[in-house]
Amino acid sequence: MENTSEKQLICMAEYQGRCDVEGKAVGHAPKVLSAYHSMISEDFDVEVFAPRCVLKAAAAESTKGAKVLKKQIVMKGHNSVFTKIANKLRMFANIRAVFRHTKAEKIWFFNTEFYLMLYLALFGNHGKEIYCTMFLDGYHGGTVAKIKQKIFEKAQKKMQCVISSGPRFQFKNAKQVFVPDYPYEEAFYVPYRKRTKEEVAVCIGTMGAEKEIEQLVECFTKNGYPLQIAGRFYDKERLERLRAAAGYKVIIRDVNLTEEEYLTMLGKAHFVVLPYRPSQYGTQTSGVLQEAVFLDTVPISYAAVLENNEVPGIGFSDWNEVTRERLFALTDMEAYERLRREVYSREHMKDVLKKVFLNEAFIG
C-alpha cells in the first residue's frame, strides 16, 4: 500500500461544458461532480477543473477553489459543420489546459466521450495517471464505429484504470472497476419516493436525436396511458411535430427541469420511459434509470437497456409491446431495495473509489 500519511492530490476534470443558449449546464456533469467529489474529498486532496457552466450548477463544496476552463459547448438543434468542428477543438483545448495546469499526478476525467479518447490516442497521457469514468463500453456498428473503437482501444493503453458505470462492461486494454453513476443516499431520496404512485408515465431529460421520442408519442397515444414528457428540446421543429402528433393524454413540455422538479416528477410517477435507441444505449448506462431505482419508479425501455444495467422493469423489443396490459404487470420492487442497499450504497462506492486511487481495486 502507498504511504497515505499525507493526502494524495486528485485532479477531477470535466472538459465538455455542455450548456443551453442561456449558459445553463445540461447533462449530468454537475451532479456527478458533486457526488464523486463528496466521496473522495475525505481521503484525498481534490483539485477541480471544469467550464463555468458546470461549476455554477455543482454543489458549492465541490467547486471551492476550482480552476475554470474557458471553453463551453452550446447545445443547439442544428449545428453547422464549422460549429461541430469548433466544438471538438474547444474540448481539445480544455483537455490540454488540464494537463498543462494541474498539480496532480492522478487525473480523473469523470464525464467522458469520444474526443477524450482521440486526444489520449494522439497525444498520450503526458506522464500522468489517467482514470476515466465510462458510461458506455465502446463503439458498435458500421465502419465509423469500428474506427472509433480502434482509437478507443488505443486510448485505453494510456489509462491507469477505467471506472465503469455499467456492471457488464468489458474493456479490452484497461484495468477496470464498477462504480455506478450516483450513490444512493436515504435521507435525500426518501422524501421524493411516494408510496402511492400516480397513474402516469414520465419521460424526462434532454430530448436529443438519440431518443425515440416519435415512437414513444405514437405508442402512448395508441395505448391511451397518460404520459408526461418534460425536457429540453434543442430542435424546436421536432417539438412542434411531436405536439401535433400527440394524443390528448400525452403532455409535452420544453423545459430545463430543476433537480427538485425532476425528482418530484420521477418520484410520483408509476413509470418512467427511457426511449433510448438500443443500438446506442444497449451498451450505455443511464442516470435516470438509476434514480428510478432509488424512487421505486418502474422503468420502461428496450430489454437490452434494462438487462445491461441489471435493473428489472418492463422491457420490450418493439414499441407495439407496450400495451396497457403490460403496464399493469407486477414488478419485483424488493429488487430495487436490494440494489439500493448493496450496489448503490454510498459507503460501498466511497470505499471502491478510495481503493481505485490507491491502486488496490482493479479487476480485468
Image (cartoon, rainbow, N blue to C red):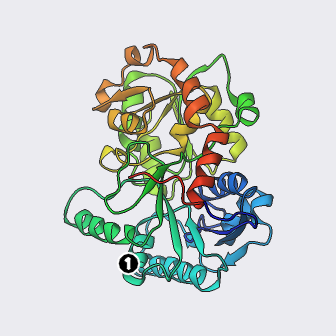
Depicted 360 relative to depicted 158: above or below: above
Q: Residue at x 56, y 71 (%)?
A: 15
Q: Secondary structure at mark 1?
A: helix
Image spot of residue 340 (x, y percent): 60, 31
Measuring from the top left, give residue 324's x and y in whole percent.
40, 17
Q: Is residue 135 above or below residue 203?
A: below
Quarter holding the N terminus is: bottom right
The residue sitting at 48% across, 76% down in the picture is 87
The residue positioned farthest toward the bottom in the image shown:
100
Residue 64 point in image, percent of width and height: 80, 67
Q: Could you tell whether 236 is left or right of 17 in the image?
A: left
Front-most of 256 and 249? 256
> How crowded is the residue under tag 1: few (<14 C-alpha within 10 Å), some, or many (20+)?
few
**Residue drawn at (25%, 69%), measured in percent from left and top?**
147
Asked if residue 262 shows in the view, the reply is: no
- From the image, tell me which residue sits under label 1: 81
Q: Nearer the viewer, residue 344 or 157?
A: 157
Rendered residue at 45%/14% (across/down): 328
Q: Is residue 29 left or right of residue 285?
A: right
Query: Which is more toward the observer, 36 or 326?
Result: 36
